[in-house]
Amino acid sequence: MLSMMAIFTRRTDRLKRLSRSFPHLPLSPFKWRTTRSMLEHVEASLRSSGGSALLHSPLGKSFVVTSDAELLRFVLVRGAEFYATADINGLEQHFRASTLTDGQAIWPLAHRLAATFPMDHREVGTHILSCIDASLPPQGGRLDATASADALWGEIQTHVLFGRRAPGIAPLVRAAFETLLGRLQSPLVHLWSSWQKLPLAANRRYRRACAIARQAVAAEIARGPSTEWCMLHTLMAQGGHGRNASDALELCMAFFFNSSATVSSSLAWLLWHVAADGPFQARLRREIDADADSVLSMAKLVAMPHLDAAIAETLRMYTPIHLSRRALRDHRACGRYDIPAGTEFVSNAWLVHRNPTRWRDPHRYGPARFIGTRTPGDTYLPFSRGPRGCPGKRISNGVLKLILARILSRWDMTAEPRHGKDFRRCIIVPTLPRELPVWLTPLARLPHTRS
Ligand code: HEM
């Protein structure tokens, strides 16, 4: 009881200090019953405050929530070394650890490893293409883009990590990820860390699902890498951490965790929008046809402005991770702000991407806005920014392009209208789509459909 009182007093003091540091920010009380209502509340507070607000919960926890360019630059880029990425009160640690066996943080190694992904390696392209061809029906038909994107990325992901198909892994990882999303439906997760330690059935289910997924990935690591280009091979070839199976496990889990729903939700929306816009689809197909062989290599897809624009616009409108959380280690000054140690920031890329003062007609899908212009980092941050920005940006852009190029070179796509609510609105990947129906019709000029 006494320690609860102490925590509460500390949190109230912190709120007082925050209110002094950010005197002009509106204080927004807690009104959150579900994650969805919490997200809506955060967005409404930011809209009415013009970019930042102080959110305060009844359990005393407070956050600076912001889509303000100056604060975002400070938190994500200039002052990045003063910040630690706050995971969701340790909940994610069941899924993957954030430290290596020697106590060092995992993220620098994850960044180094992702940078070695070979975009111009023909074998990588060929393996990914074989995943695409095996996942989609050659004779065409009706697909749910959401389910197909998920299955396809699951296949590609295991190829990228282990250099081979590992069919059982992706569904187990996905099951653990889904249980995590389930846990995050309660705002309590963000406010009271001890809650996840209670012997509740849901907590036990989550821990069990994570343990099963981790065991399967550990067994795959024990089999060793199949090819020289896969992540596991690169990791094992490095000295130090690379030789340690526990570290390899945490790195693989970190890649699975961060890329699970981000790539597949982007892919599903990308396919649906391209399918829904016949003239744009034809333009994309002409761009790809200009170099027929280009569909075989990610490196050759680099100079494809319309393909790039389609992906960039999808990530703007359906930003998979729109909240990033950071905790300030020491007391710091940022422009007009004097920020106390321990301050927690939550950035909101979703609002940055849908801000009508920065984007014309922001709720309309319009890839043309990305053609022939450079978008400033303050206005566009689907992969976050700075040293803790996404290390998988190159991989996901390359893979998304290759998939779209392959599909467009083989099938014509049409979309069925969407019904009901678009998103599941969970907190980690709020734009996970519900069913997105798409029809594939084989293109007549394909060798196997020619008479
Ligand atoms: C469309 C696809 C993707 C998007 C939009 C995306 C977005 C992001 C964002 C916004 C962050 C920062 C999160 C934060 O600030 O809390 C992040 C981190 C991360 N992403 Fe991605 N990601 C994508 C795909 C991938 C892929 C394919 C990989 C790996 C192969 C990956 C690996 C990571 C890792 C390891 C981190 C943590 C980095 C760190 O802690 O420093 N991501 N991602």
Image (cartoon, helix red, strand yellow):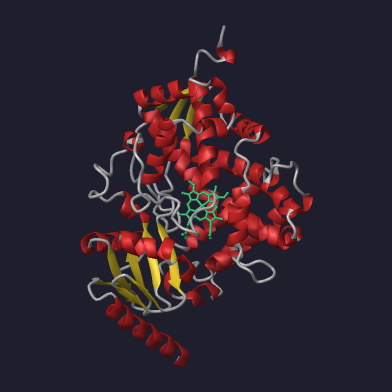
Decide which of 382, 300 is in the foreground and name it.
300
Looking at the image, how many numbered discs can be counted on the residues? 0
Q: Position of residue 207 (x, y in %)?
A: 60, 65
Is 73 placed above or below 149 here? below
Is 444 placed above or below 322 here? above
Q: Is residue 85 visible?
A: no
Is 161 placed above or below 341 here? above
Instruction: Indicate the quadrant containing the N terminus: top left, top right, bottom left or bottom right.
Output: bottom left
Residue at the outermost right position: 223
Decide which of 144, 332 is in the foreground and name it.
332
Q: Position of residue 198 (x, y in %)?
A: 54, 75
Q: Position of residue 351 (x, y in %)?
A: 31, 54
Residue at the outermost bottom position: 2
Q: Position of residue 33 (x, y in %)?
A: 34, 67
Residue beneath the point at 40% across and 59% down = 323
Q: Is residue 214 visible?
A: yes
Indicate the quadrant where residue 243 lies: bottom right
Instruction: Indicate the quadrant containing the C terminus: top left, top right, bottom left or bottom right.
Output: top right
Decide which of 39, 258 is in the foreground and name it.
258
* Residue 356 as seen in the image, left or right of residue 347: left
Indicate the quadrant where residue 121 lies: top right
* Residue 245 as seen in the image, left or right of residue 319: right
Residue beneath the point at 50% across and 71% down = 89
Decide which of 262, 70 is in the foreground and name it.
70
